[in-house]
Image (cartoon, rainbow, N blue to C red):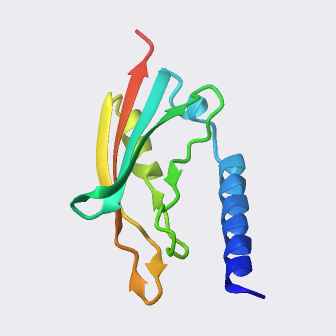
Amino acid sequence: MSRGRQQAIDAKNRMLDRWSREDAAPRLADLVPSLVRLTLQIEEGHGANSIDSARYVRHIVVASAPAVFTVPCTEPNCEDGGHDVTREVLRGLGRGETEIRGETACRGRRGTEPCPRILRYTARAEYAAK
């Protein structure tokens, strides 16, 4: 089997695994019933280098979203990488924080070296008035 074909199969398996974890996770609305809106601002790059960074905003559909916040690595040659900020985001939401910021290194590897990608995120939350 060619390397490209194997990479495609591995990517599909990672996607199926992620979907399985999301399906099994509790719903965000059940864990944080007062939450009405949540966005994740994502910036991923190589350390402090912002030239090669990927930036985007993920709008979370609170009513149906799983309580899982994982972001795949955008490094094309990264194997088994990605970022899981679930614990940090849920901790902040549980405290009623309106802004949760953090940074995490990719957990994957590029060949024999760790993947150099760094993810910076800001979760912005709005809650129902009490």
> Nearest the camera: 122 or 2?
2
Residue 88, position as x, y percentages in the image: 38, 48
Identified at 63% across, 36% down, the residue is 27
State the count of labels. 0
Vertical arrangement, residue 52 with respect to residue 107, above or below: above
Of all residues shown, which one is farthest toward the front? 51
Residue 104, position as x, y percentages in the image: 34, 60
Report if residue 78 is visible in the image: yes
Tell me the quarter of the picture where residue 46 sits.
Answer: bottom left
Vertical arrangement, residue 57 with respect to residue 7, above or below: above
Tell me the quarter of the picture where residue 91 sits.
Answer: top left
Report if residue 130 is visible in the image: no
Identified at 50% across, 30% down, the residue is 32
Vertical arrangement, residue 80 with respect to residue 125, above or below: below
Of all residues shown, which one is farthest toward the left? 48
> Nearest the camera: 117 or 51?
51
Residue 93, position as x, y percentages in the image: 40, 34
Identified at 47% across, 50% down, the residue is 86
Residue 94, position as x, y percentages in the image: 41, 35
Relative to 17, 106 lies left or right? left
> Nearest the camera: 42 or 61?
42
Relative to 128, 30 lies left or right? right
Of all residues shown, which one is farthest toward the top? 130
* Image quarter hosting the N terminus: bottom right
Relative to 74, 102 lies left or right? left
* Image quarter hosting the C terminus: top left
Identified at 39% across, 86% down, the residue is 113
